[in-house]
């Protein structure tokens, strides 16, 4: 039963172009389901098969995820989506005749508004980072400026190579989800921070001229996602910001502040690399709150 899962995961990489992180999520979800089926399905001729899985089996599994394991509805919905994709693949490959997941109900998670910083908090975060004079400090300043200037995902940020940036014209080129390339612009302050880091600090961190990564650790290696999270945590502490700050919080702040400034939703969608504008529309809830605040401050009868 494990071989079809591995074949499906390979299909997601080769045919669908899934990113490493998305692939790992599918792998974890499907192997968790596989472990459950090994314990609960009866053996036929010494083994179990995916043909034995029916709607009752799937329903019991979802019940266990929500009850015994205590997963949030959003996590359960993701795991169910992985199972549905897997069974669709099994049907297409002729490994099962019917898809038992077609009638499986999925929890409908409530829509959580993304957390973001105020413009004053972002300004304070960047000012405190700019004051750090060490090579690592100047690197961290450039990272924060670029995240807020571009809305890049953390994986997109650490994947940047030297030939992906153009400081003369002020833009970065990156590969987003599904291998889709997009270009995002840098405002002058972000361009200045990146130029300063590349000229003065990266040369001190680099141990090899063959290393193409822009952002390096003290060993001269490409930064990891975990390292960037630690940078965000330390930067927030220096700026006296109590809210937990992650790369995604700066991405949300980038989108929210653009929309508050009057940028069209379609424009923000392109900059964020969202495949569908419905994903971007969640930010309209935030900007509507902002508009209401401005209305109440400005209207003479408020």
Image: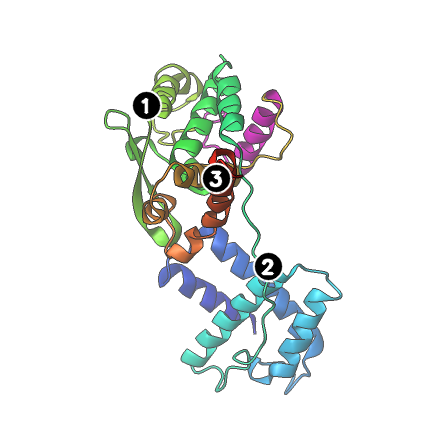
Closer to the camera in the image, 282 or 231 = 282
Label 1 Cα crowd, 10 Å radius (few <14 / some 14-19 / many 20+): few
What are the residue bounds of the magenta stretch? 216-238
Q: Which mark is residue 188?
A: 1
Residue visible at 42% across and 57% down?
A: 278
Is 122 contained in the magenta span? Answer: no
Location of residue 91 (image quadrant): bottom left
Determine whether, in the image, residue 164 is placed left or right of residue 229.
Answer: left
Of the two numbered discs 1 and 2 on the same chain, state the one appearing first in sequence: 2
Is 234 contained in the magenta span? Answer: yes
Location of residue 182 (image quadrant): top left
Q: Position of residue 41 (x, y in %)?
A: 67, 80
Residues at marks 1 and 2 touching, judged by CB atoms closer than 8 Å? no
Residue visible at 50% across and 76% down?
A: 87
Q: Which residue is mark 2?
A: 110
Q: Main secondary structure of the magenta part?
A: helix
Badge 2 marks a residue whose secondary structure is loop
Badge 3 marks a residue whose secondary structure is helix
Q: Which residue is mark 3?
A: 295
Quadrant where the N terminus is found in the figure: bottom right
Closer to the camera in the image, 9 or 231 = 231
Query: In the image, which is nearer the foreground, mark 3 or mark 1?
Result: 3
Q: Position of residue 132 (x, y in %)?
A: 51, 15
Label 2 Cα crowd, 10 Å radius (few <14 / some 14-19 / many 20+): few
């Amino acid at each position: 039963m494990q071989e079809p899962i591995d074949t499906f995961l390979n299909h997601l990489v080769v045919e669908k172009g899934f990113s490493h992180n998305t692939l790992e999520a599918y792998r974890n979800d499907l192997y968790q389901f596989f472990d459950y089926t090994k314990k609960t399905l009866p053996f036929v001729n010494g083994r179990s098969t995916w043909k034995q899985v029916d709607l009752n089996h799937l329903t019991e599994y979802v019940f266990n995820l929500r009850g015994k394991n205590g997963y949030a509805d959003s996590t359960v919905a993701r795991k169910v989506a992985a199972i549905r994709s897997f069974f669709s693949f099994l049907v297409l490959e002729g490994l099962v005749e019917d898809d038992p997941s077609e009638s499986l109900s999925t929890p409908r998670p409530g829509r959580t508004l993304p957390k973001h910083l105020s413009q004053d908090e972002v300004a304070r975060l960047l000012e405190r980072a700019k004051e750090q004079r060490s090579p690592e400090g100047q690197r961290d300043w450039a990272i924060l400026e670029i995240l807020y200037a571009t809305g890049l995902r953390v994986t997109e940020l650490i994947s940047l190579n030297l030939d992906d940036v153009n400081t003369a014209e002020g833009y970065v080129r990156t590969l987003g989800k599904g291998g889709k390339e997009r270009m995002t612009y840098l405002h002058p302050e972000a361009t200045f921070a990146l130029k300063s880091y590349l000229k003065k600090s990266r040369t001190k961190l680099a141990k090899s001229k063959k290393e193409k990564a822009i952002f390096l650790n003290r060993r001269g290696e490409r930064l990891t996602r975990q390292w960037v999270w630690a940078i965000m945590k330390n930067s927030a502490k220096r700026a006296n910001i109590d809210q937990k700050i992650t790369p995604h919080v700066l991405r949300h702040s980038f989108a929210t502040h653009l929309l508050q400034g009057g940028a069209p939703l379609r424009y923000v969608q392109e900059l964020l690399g969202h495949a569908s504008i419905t994903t971007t529309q969640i930010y309209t809830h935030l900007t509507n709150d902002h508009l209401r605040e401005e209305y109440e401050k400005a209207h003479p009868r408020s």
